[in-house]
Image (cartoon, rainbow, N blue to C red):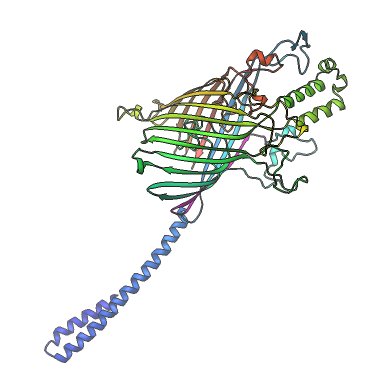
Amino acid sequence: MKLAKITLSAVLAASFLHADDAADIAALKAQLAELTKQVSELKSQQQSANVGALNNQIKELKVKTGGDNIKWSADFRTEWDNINYKMAGRTGGFNNNGFVFPSSDPVFGSLPSNYNKPTLFTERLILGMAAAPTKDLSFVGKLSMQKAFGATANNMQNNNPFSYSTFDWINNEQAMNNGIRVKEAYAIYFNEAYNVPYTASIGRRPSTDGLPINLSEGNKDANSPLAHLINVEYDGASILTNWEKVTGAPGMSLKFCAGNGLTNAAAWGNGNVPNYANQNNMNGDVSLWGMIFVPYDDGQYSVHSMWFNAYNVIGYTQNAYTAYSNAYGQYYSQTYAGMTGAGGNYNSATGWNNLQYNQNNMQFTNVGNLQGGTVMAMMNGIGNNWSDFLDRTILFGSFAFTQTQPSATATNMNGQAMATGQLATGNGMLGSAQSKYGSSWWFGINMPALVTSDGKIGLEYNQGSKYWRPITYGEDNFAGSRLATRGQAYSAYYDQPLLKNLSLMASYSLMNYDYAGSNAFFGYEGTPWTQSEALAQNMNFMKSAQDIRVFLRYRY
């Protein structure tokens, strides 16, 4: 280009020197035209070269910023918990129709009045994955690990004395299995039809830490579904449609979800039926579907609702439960074995075999279906610029209900009677063959801490009725699900950022139980006994549970 400019200047200068010579002028014009053509070609080549170089730079930038790869995030938490359970307890022996067992009896004697773990240290690591190879397709995933300090899932105290395969000291220095826990993994497709934007997703769902429990966990963003009813991991699919453009209602959306919580497929190489075939003598698939409707959400004020139906939910039958309890008492209690005429069962091979037989027969059974619904209202900021404190305050209130639909008889998903060996008779849900309705209220406030500029304080209260039974086993609370409480539950927390990626959180939870079975499954074991009813059956009633927790959390 520089050479072309110099040559052109020389030609122009020459044209002034020989302006009177017509032949020279014609020649100069021809030369000028040729040079102009060359300059145009050089410009075109330069532009082409620049575009190619720019494309290469963009490609490199995409690779570095995640356009063509998975972008990782880290969420690491180290936690201390102080856990206490207050029991009804009993100082003397069990009174069985006038016969009082010795207080020293290992099964029917005195019952402890409390259990506790003053110091429990745990650590949790979540590695997040995200990729968006195209504008209409994304992938999201999370890999998770959570463990107590110095322990594995089986706890080293339960190891065979001649095998230390789960001994925590050498977990990462020995040849173990190739297992890894996948908390979430799903693909999302984005599109729009008839002015209605929608997303379709399938995989392992982001189904824990939904609204509004994300606030007390220090999570700004909430997952789905609503945590008042469902807070467990499961696999399935969903489709979300946004109706704001069509209706004009801010944030209006409708979401349909479906999935499985348990499969009936036979394991590979089981030796009984072909691999992954339906097992007719076992429980059917535990499946669920529901919908989430948001009629209004302008970013400050919002209303959320949800309804679901779960099929073939699991639990233990009364017969299986009672048979195991009798076998346990006959083996471990000499007095009880003598009373029942099974004296030879006490601490004997016969008693042990009987106990093992009934333990094996105490298997999960499909006990029926469960449906439920919830409505929640939330204010993310109170008023309009009334004060900085109110602008940063969040209020919510939620109502939810559940209703059982017990099976008339114990059957699997195909409608076939359960095997006799499974002791499937005496079927029912929550200790009743009748449909039972339960309800719950939940209120909370999340507000600025005042003592610091960026800290947050939260207070929450919830209560549940006698037959209240949500699916909230995945709630992040070692003392049990707060939202499943059949009684009253209280919670307070303080969340304080320390550095850009480091925060400190402290919380206190107290659950006061009016009825037993708050954290049980859906069969006989979930019967809502009162304290007196439980003790009358030699069951130690839990009156309350509390958890004091403090954790440091690093997120990047």
Quadrant of the rendered image containing residue 458: top left
Which x, y percent locates residue 329? 79, 20
Which x, y percent locates residue 62? 44, 57
Side of 362 relative to 449 (left or right): right
The image shows residue 207, relative to residue 544, as above or below, that is below
Side of 2 relative to 467 (left or right): left
- Which residue appears at 32% of the width and 73% of the height? 44
Which x, y percent locates residue 502? 48, 37
Side of 405 relative to 41 (left or right): right
Q: Is residue 391 visible?
A: yes
Name the quarter where the N terminus is drawn. Answer: bottom left
- Which residue appears at 39% of the width and 25% of the height? 450
Q: Main secondary structure of the magenta part?
A: strand
Instruction: Check residue 145 for magenta coloring.
Output: yes
Using the image as rendered, state which of residue 193 and residue 251 is in the foreground.
193
Number of on-image labels: 0
Q: Is residue 471 visible?
A: no
The residue range painted magenta reads: 131-152
Side of 535 relative to 336 (left or right): left
Instruction: Check residue 402 for magenta coloring.
Output: no
